[in-house]
Image (cartoon, rainbow, N blue to C red):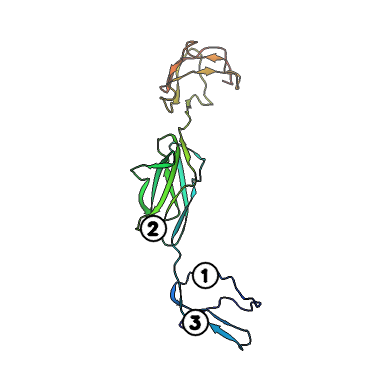
């Protein structure tokens, strides 16, 4: 309204209309002026109009749906914010038919809005999960992940500690084979086999044939059999 001016466009070919992207310069007293390049003709809005701030908006980008997240994984929840939303809350829910049952305990009740949050995936295997990201103030926007995702158990893992290469075992001595057990509920028992060729097949069973050993991370073995440098 005469206190601040800035150009919308210059040297525009004549047309009865001009497509204008409204700027983010908020003001209750705006006018538009049009004039020819020679200054011979000009006109401006008869009355003031208002440029108001666009309402804030959040869009959840990840998870976008269809993911299978492993229990214990570190998953980065991502979203896009337009407008002013300084703090957000993140919730997880489960689709039940057309409804969503939200967990009463949020993933995080309030965190600075950085458009992402690193989430330790909980031990709650299942399908139909959705994420909700919302501002913490009254009237702030709310957004849900587009489609549901799943949480799946981590695959059972075993890791040999000893022998693990470079060792020399003397026939007739007693040694202890050691391993990390992983999830003993998922893998309560193990089979321990040996190859002397440096590759499959593992033809020798080190314990009593036809039975398994408990997955407790240790097995006492009396070293036997023919010599080999590729066990």
Front-lying residue, 35 or 198: 35
| Label 2 CA crowd tier, 10 Å (few <14, some 14–19, many 20+) | some
Element assignment for label 2? loop
Q: Nearer the viewer, mark 1 or mark 3?
A: 3
Q: In this view, does 229 lie to the left or right of 120?
A: right
The residue located at (60%, 21%) in the rendering is: 200
Q: Which of marks 3 and 2 is in front?
A: 3
Element assignment for label 3? loop
| Label 1 CA crowd tier, 10 Å (few <14, some 14–19, many 20+) | few
Front-lying residue, 38 or 113: 38
Compared to 69, does 111 lie above or below? below
Compared to 47, does 158 lie above or below? above
Question: Residue 126, located in which quarter of the rendered image?
Answer: top left
Compared to 70, does 185 lie above or below? above
* Label 1 to label 2: alpha-carbon separation: 22 Å
In contact (CB < 8 Å): disc 1 and disc 2: no
Numbered circle sitting on residue 46? 3
Q: In this view, does 221 lie to the left or right of 225?
A: left
* Label 3 to label 2: alpha-carbon separation: 35 Å
The residue located at (34%, 58%) in the rendering is: 138
* Label 1 to label 3: alpha-carbon separation: 19 Å
Q: Position of residue 178 (x, y in %)?
A: 45, 23
Q: Position of residue 180 (x, y in %)?
A: 44, 27
Compared to 126, does 92 lie above or below? below
The residue located at (53%, 82%) in the rendering is: 44
Q: Is residue 108 left or right of residue 18?
A: left
In contact (CB < 8 Å): disc 3 and disc 2: no
Residue annotated with mark 1 = 22
Q: Position of residue 90 (x, y in %)?
A: 39, 49
Residue annotated with mark 2 = 140
The residue located at (42%, 44%) in the rendering is: 119
């Amino acid at each position: 309204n005469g206190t601040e001016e800035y150009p919308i466009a210059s040297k525009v070919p004549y047309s009865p209309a001009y497509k204008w992207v409204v700027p983010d310069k908020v003001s209750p007293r705006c006018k538009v002026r049009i004039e020819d390049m020679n200054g011979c003709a000009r006109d401006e809005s008869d009355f003031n109009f208002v440029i108001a701030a666009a309402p804030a908006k959040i869009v959840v980008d990840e998870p976008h749906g269809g993911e299978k997240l492993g229990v214990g994984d570190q998953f980065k929840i991502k979203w896009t914010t337009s407008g002013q939303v300084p703090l957000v809350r993140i919730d997880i829910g489960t689709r039940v038919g057309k409804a969503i049952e939200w967990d009463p305990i949020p993933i995080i009740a309030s965190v600075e809005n950085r458009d992402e949050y690193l989430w330790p995936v909980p031990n709650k295997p299942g399908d139909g999960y959705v994420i909700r990201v919302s501002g913490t103030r009254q009237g702030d926007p709310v957004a849900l992940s587009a489609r549901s995702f799943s949480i799946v158990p981590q695959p059972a893992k075993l890791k040999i500690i000893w022998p693990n290469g470079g060792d020399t075992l003397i026939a007739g001595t007693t040694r202890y084979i050691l391993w990390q057990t992983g999830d003993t509920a998922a893998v309560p028992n193990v089979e321990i086999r040996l190859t002397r060729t440096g590759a499959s097949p593992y033809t020798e069973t080190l314990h009593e044939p036809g039975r398994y050993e408990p997955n407790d991370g240790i097995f006492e073995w009396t070293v036997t059999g023919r010599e080999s440098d590729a066990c």
